[in-house]
Amino acid sequence: MRWNFVFTEMWQGLRRNLTMTVATTITITIAMFALGAAWLFHAQINRTHDYWFGKIEVSVFLKQDSTGPQQDAIQQELNSLPQVKQVFFEDRSTAWKRFKKEFAKTSPALVNNSSEQQMPQSFRVKLHNPRQFNIVAQAVRDMPGVEDVATEPDALKKLFSFFDTLERFVLLFAGAALIAALLLIFNNVRLAAYTRRREVGIMRLVGASDIYIEAPFVLEIVVCAVVGGAIATGLLFFTKLVVFDHGIGHAFNTNLLDIIGWGTVVQAIPYLLLTAIVASVLTAVGTLQRYLRV
């Protein structure tokens, strides 16, 4: 195969259909960027879940008039559950110290109007798998002597819900952009094949193989895919810096959220480029099989 001829034809094709080439590259860029953004948000959601689920405890608060036998029964039930890793008993003195430490600066009036005797005793429960906290909560919630069972804070539920919704939106947008990119590739290849139908006819008459004829068309799309993927990669680095580090990182307390690192962006790069190239090549080859017939 004369590769000089193939690359020359590829370059002429890119220049001949410059408007379509630019439009295809931009559409691929948008699609790959949206897929990469969905990747980043998915990684952030998993990181946030892992960060918080490792810290979540089930707190079983006892009634003020709970008896010793009731407390023993609750502790025995907790220790019997396979989901439970360890059980700690927090008396009023320990609860009072923790209460003052948490609210001394933010709500001093609340601390001044409270006392140690008002603090509820509780069992602090560590779990093997924090995702199973509801199983433990249901097991002891209705036992005698139990006032309340606290599990996942509402703030975390809202945070997880926000990220889940955002991830679904970005993923849907990425799917729509990818479909648009494939349709544009289809039209671009079809137009190129129609424009060069005389050249293709002559090549067939002199015995050129299908691979030799189709190679310039496919390489044109590969160039668009590589350039689009490269631009999308740059946009992902920009998104990591602006949206995650300076946006989400500043909007939430550092103790509430563990922001993804640059390694997550680097891991996404080969997948984005591979997706762009494979999807583009398959679409181009499929289009050529149908329209490159002389």
Image (cartoon, rainbow, N blue to C red):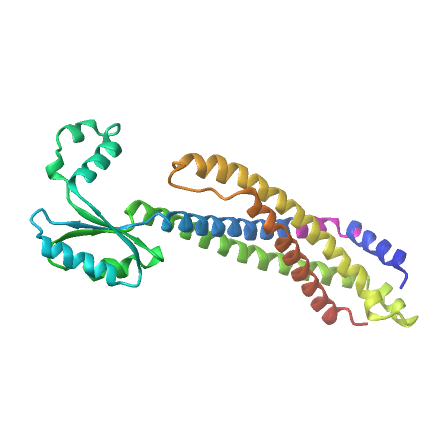
Task: Answer whether residue 36 is visible to the viewer in this image.
Answer: yes
Q: Position of residue 79 (x, y in %)?
A: 24, 59
* Magenta region, main secondary structure: helix
In this image, 4 relative to 114: left or right?
Answer: right
Residue at the farthest left position: 65
Residue at the farthest right position: 206
Q: Residue at x 59, y 50 (%)?
A: 267
Q: Position of residue 84 (x, y in %)?
A: 29, 58
Q: Is residue 9 magenta?
A: no
Quadrant of the image containing the N terminus: bottom right
Q: Give the residues in magenta.
A: 16-25
In the image shown, does 179 or 255 lie closer to the viewer?
A: 255
In the rendered image of this protein, does residue 286 appear above or below residue 267?
below
Task: Answer whether residue 20 is visible to the viewer in this image.
Answer: no
In this image, 108 relative to 289: left or right?
Answer: left
In this image, 87 relative to 215: left or right?
Answer: left
Q: How many marks?
A: 0
In this image, 275 relative to 3: left or right?
Answer: left
In the image shown, does 221 or 19 lie closer to the viewer?
A: 221
Q: Position of residue 260 (x, y in %)?
A: 50, 44
Q: Residue at x 65, y 61 (%)?
A: 279
In the image shown, does 133 or 164 lie closer to the viewer?
A: 133
Quadrant of the image containing the C terminus: bottom right
Q: Is residue 17 magenta?
A: yes
Q: Residue at x 54, y 37 (%)?
A: 241
Q: Residue at x 58, y 44 (%)?
A: 236
In the image shown, does 128 or 192 lie closer to the viewer?
A: 128
Q: Position of residue 52 (x, y in %)?
A: 37, 48
